Amino acid sequence: MRKIDEVFIKLKEYLKQSLQDECGMGVIEVTLIVVVLVGLAILFKSEIEAVAAIVFKSLRSKVNNV
């Protein structure tokens, strides 16, 4: 099973438990925000990796110059 599948299974279980809990809407709001952020990360994965690669390349070159 892929790591992302495990994350979604755990998130689904957490969401199911959160919906049964009546402590307030804060839990649901936070859960929805996390779901949206995970979705955006999946959608823009290649762009995020490209930016990270550029940043780390820049950092390596600056560290090597020191």
Image (tube, rainbow, N blue to C red):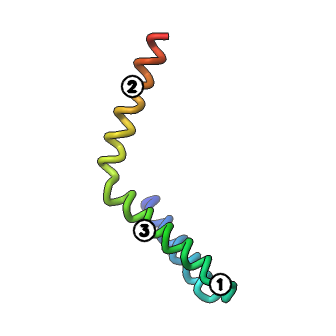
Q: Residue 24, position in %: x, y?
A: 65, 84
The residue drawn where x is 39% and y is 25% is: 58
Indicate whether 61 appears above or below 43.
above
From the image, tell me which residue sits under label 1: 24
From the image, tell me which residue sits under label 3: 36
Q: CB of mark 2 within 8 Å of CB of mark 1? A: no
Compute the Cα span from label 2 to label 3: 30 Å
Q: Nearer the viewer, residue 52 or 11?
A: 52
Category of crowding for the residue at label 2, using alpha-carbon neighbours closer than 10 angstroms: few (below 14), some (14–19), many (at least 20): few
Question: Mark 3: which secondary structure?
Answer: helix
Q: Residue 57, position in %: x, y?
A: 38, 27
Q: Give the mark toward the camera: 3 or 1.
A: 1
Quarter assignment of residue 28: bottom right
Quarter assignment of residue 20: bottom right
Category of crowding for the residue at label 3, using alpha-carbon neighbours closer than 10 angstroms: few (below 14), some (14–19), many (at least 20): few
Q: Amino acid at mark 3?
A: Val
Quarter assignment of residue 19: bottom right
Q: Quadrant of the N terminus?
A: bottom left
Looking at marks 2 and 1 on the same chain, the residue that comes earlier in the sequence is marked by 1
From the image, tell me which residue sits under label 2: 58
The residue drawn where x is 54% and y is 73% is: 31
The residue most toward the right is 23
